[in-house]
Image (spheres, rainbow, N blue to C red):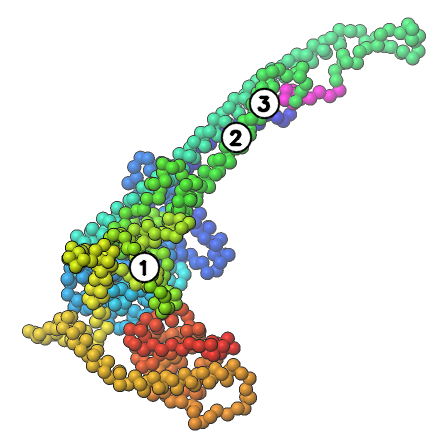
């Protein structure tokens, strides 16, 4: 006979808690879960590879060691949340998104140059450590920036030293996708990244130009920033842990009462069964006590027939089970207490179902928080308002202390170099770096030259400049945007112009008093201070002389000569300026001839496009007096489909190279060409910007644009 009462409900334990002795096992389990999830993703998308996990044996061992070390340092309260800390730092897969989208090494290079400039380190010492082959840095122009203090080539040269610091030990490791690991790596995990090889010697010599206290200070700021991020994490996850425990206690209270009612009903059932058995035996005894007299009523005189037995006094042919009768029986078989218990049981069943849904909701929110806190853009005020009580809003939305985002990027690289555990705590460190990147000029959006209003005629607009604004405070956003969309002033300047504001924005603040003597006050005075700042930095912009063969040869020869007079960088720049003035005179004389040639070339291309736009006889002959045309200067044509290039090649002779969009574009060709053409409608964006940046610096850009050419592209 099946018991109709529910089974006793077990109490829910805190399965979120991980005891210290289980930390190692928890880490292995989370890694296994991540690999399984990643394997399933790889089957659905063959572009995903296992390398994206950063969990090769050496890196897994290093990440595990760092995680265990961090767990040991947690206070008693945070240790209760060790399981979430493990999950956070294992399920954050790779630095690939932040290191490339955030251009961390670019920011680190700028910070290093800023510090060397403050220290008045001789430029000769810097140039001798930088690459001298311009082709080496062509692939480093991943973002279009213009700094008023350093040439792009100089920034890229420093970035080259940082990026390829270990290339003479081992090639850069693939990150499993199209990129490479430039921060953490298997080489760093194994501690084999400090070999005595040329690339490391230059890198370490470069770092040696910075005093140790300056590097230590950067690490101290980095650690303070990470600590603040960690505290915010434990504040948030601690709230969800409290909610979780409250829901568990509520469910256990309900289950305890359900079990108590069940026990009472079970006792009632046993009593009912005992009473039923007693009645059954009593009836049986009564039946046996009466004589069993045979009766044939049909043969007897009905008037004299004895009374027939009462059927209801015999045992029924079917009777319900005792517990079924207890639960569903007639009122005569139930008492008021049973009715009350059954009603309460139904109420508790509804409460139990609702409590389980609330617990699932808390667990779901907890999981979302673990994901969103690593991606700062998702941890918005809307999310915080919905998921957290008002008393925690400020703590959850308070930005981590970032005194200088450029410094944080350098500190990240340096932390890897000195063996810090923080870079190997992928979850917390990636989460922190995501916020750091949001403060960089390019952190919110890249600059696009195609959208630069500089080339458009826009009516001047007057605006009131606030008194001494904080250029790096993210206080400005459009109406209706959440706080993540907020920009700082430096970001707005960059997104519109592609230029980086100077890091020291108060260099000329002391001149405010003198400006007041001229009657220049408030907004006008502040505007002048910023103009002074921008122009002064631009005037003193540091050149990338490491790419000047004559300059580097002079430095090398001066080291070989004893008691020889050395040339300073300032003298070299002055000499270079004189040479440039002389070259300008020569270029002016050649400009008219060059423009005539360009006009002739445009006419050829225009005519060719006209021919392709119209149906012509295949046997039509080409005017031999015009074609082929021989160019007078070294010319390179970038872009255009292969069929378009093939159509033009027979018409243009001489020193001219065609680089179709299907071909690998070598930007170094720009340096050796007198004239550059760009078919901007048929060229990869990244190649276009690299060519434009290089050509603009050399004054060789003359891009081909027009409807006829575009239509020719469409026909291809």
Q: Is residue 281 above or below residue 380?
A: above
Label disc, if present, on residue 462 of the rendered structure: 1
- Residue sitting farthest toward the left: 563
Separation of residues labelled 3 and 2 (CA atoms)? 14 Å
Q: Nearer the viewer, residue 419 or 221?
A: 221
Q: Quadrant of residue 389?
A: top left
Nearer the N terminus, badge 3 or badge 2?
A: 3
Q: Are marks 2 and 1 in contact (CB under 8 Å)?
A: no
Which residue: 23% across, 70% down? 544
Residue 248: image location, x then y, percent: 45, 32
Describe the element under mark 2 as helix, strand or loop. helix
Query: Label 2 to label 1, Cα distance in Å?
Result: 64 Å
Q: Identify whether 151 is placed above or below 240.
A: below
Task: Give the crowd class for mark 3: few <14, some 14-19, many >=20 residues within 10 Å.
Answer: few
Label 3 to label 1: alpha-carbon separation:
75 Å
Report x, y in % for residue 459. Answer: 35, 65
Q: Is residue 17 above or below residue 593?
A: above
Q: Which label belongs to residue 352?
A: 2
Q: Quadrant of residue 7?
A: top right
Q: Residue at x 38, y 50 (%)?
A: 484
Residue under the point 41% across and 47% down: 371
Query: Over which residues does the magenta segment extend?
Result: 317-327
State the mark number for residue 343: 3
Q: Could you tell me which residue is drawn at 50 percent across and 34 percent down?
A: 356
Closer to the chain start, of discs 2 and 1, is 2
Tag nearer the camera, 3 or 1: 1
Q: Is residue 699 magenta?
A: no
Residue 18 visible at all: no
Is disc 3 in contact with disc 1, using a CB cutoff of under 8 Å?
no
């Amino acid at each position: 006979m099946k018991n109709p009462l529910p089974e006793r409900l077990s109490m829910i334990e805190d399965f979120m808690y991980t005891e210290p002795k289980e930390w190692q096992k928890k880490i292995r389990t989370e890694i296994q879960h991540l690999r399984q999830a990643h394997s399933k993703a790889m089957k659905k998308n063959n572009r995903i590879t296992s390398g994206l996990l950063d969990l090769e044996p050496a890196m897994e061992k290093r990440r595990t060691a760092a995680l265990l070390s961090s767990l040991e340092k947690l206070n008693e309260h945070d240790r209760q949340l060790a399981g979430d800390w493990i999950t956070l730092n294992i399920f954050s897969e790779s630095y690939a998104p932040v290191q490339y989208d955030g251009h961390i090494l670019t920011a680190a290079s700028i910070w290093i140059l800023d510090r060397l400039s403050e220290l008045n380190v001789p430029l000769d010492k810097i140039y001798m450590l930088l690459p001298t082959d311009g082709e080496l840095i062509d692939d480093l122009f991943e973002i279009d920036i213009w700094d008023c203090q350093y040439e792009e080539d100089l920034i890229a040269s420093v970035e080259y030293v940082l990026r390829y610091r270990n290339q003479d030990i081992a090639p850069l490791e693939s990150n499993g996708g199209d990129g490479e690991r430039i921060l953490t790596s298997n080489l760093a995990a194994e501690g084999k990244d400090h070999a005595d090889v040329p690339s490391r010697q230059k890198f370490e010599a470069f770092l040696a130009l910075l005093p140790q206290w300056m590097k230590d200070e950067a690490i101290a700021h980095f650690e303070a920033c990470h600590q603040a991020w960690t505290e915010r994490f434990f504040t948030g996850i601690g709230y969800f842990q409290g909610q979780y425990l409250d829901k568990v206690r509520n469910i256990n209270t309900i289950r305890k009462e359900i079990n108590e009612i069940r026990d009472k009903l079970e006792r009632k059932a046993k009593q009912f069964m005992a009473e039923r058995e007693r009645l059954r035996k009593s009836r049986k005894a009564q039946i046996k006590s009466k004589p069993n007299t045979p009766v044939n009523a049909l043969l007897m005189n009905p008037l004299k027939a004895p009374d027939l037995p009462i059927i209801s006094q015999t045992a029924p042919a079917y009777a319900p089970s005792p517990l079924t009768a207890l639960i569903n029986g007639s009122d005569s078989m139930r008492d008021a207490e049973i009715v009350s218990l059954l009603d309460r049981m139904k109420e508790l069943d509804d409460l139990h179902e609702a409590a389980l849904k609330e617990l699932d909701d808390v667990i779901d929110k907890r999981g979302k928080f673990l994901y969103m806190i690593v991606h700062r853009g998702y941890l918005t005020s809307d999310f915080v308002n919905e998921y957290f009580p008002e008393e925690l809003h400020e703590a959850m939305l308070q930005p981590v202390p970032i005194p200088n985002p450029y410094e944080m990027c350098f500190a990240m690289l340096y932390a890897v170099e000195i063996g810090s555990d923080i870079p190997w705590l992928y979850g917390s460190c990636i989460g922190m770096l995501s916020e750091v990147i949001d403060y960089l000029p390019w952190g919110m959006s890249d600059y696009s030259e195609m959208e630069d209003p500089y080339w458009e005629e826009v009516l001047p607009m007057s605006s009131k400049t606030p008194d001494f604004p904080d250029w790096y405070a993210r206080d400005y956003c459009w109406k209706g945007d959440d706080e993540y969309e907020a920009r700082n002033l430096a970001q707005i300047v960059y997104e519109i112009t592609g230029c980086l504001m100077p890091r020291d924005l108060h260099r000329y603040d002391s001149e405010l008093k003198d400006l007041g003597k001229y009657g220049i006050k408030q907004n006008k005075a502040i505007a002048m201070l910023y103009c002074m700042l921008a122009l002064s930095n631009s005037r003193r912009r540091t050149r990338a002389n490491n790419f000047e063969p004559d300059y580097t040869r002079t430095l090398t020869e001066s080291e070989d000569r004893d008691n020889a007079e050395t040339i300073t960088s300032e003298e070299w720049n002055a000499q270079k300026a004189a040479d440039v003035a002389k070259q300008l005179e020569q270029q002016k004389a050649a400009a008219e001839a060059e423009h005539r040639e360009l006009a002739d070339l445009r006419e050829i291309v225009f005519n060719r496009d006209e021919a392709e736009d119209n149906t012509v006889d295949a046997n039509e002959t080409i005017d031999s007096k015009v074609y082929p045309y021989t160019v007078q200067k070294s010319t390179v044509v970038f872009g255009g489909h292969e069929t378009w290039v093939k159509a033009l090649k027979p018409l243009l002779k001489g020193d001219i190279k065609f680089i179709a969009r299907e071909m690998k574009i070598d930007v170094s060709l720009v340096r050796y060409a007198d004239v550059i053409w760009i078919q901007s409608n048929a060229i990869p964006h990244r190649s276009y910007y690299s060519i434009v940046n290089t050509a603009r610096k050399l004054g060789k850009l003359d891009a081909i644009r027009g409807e006829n050419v575009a239509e020719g592209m469409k026909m291809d």
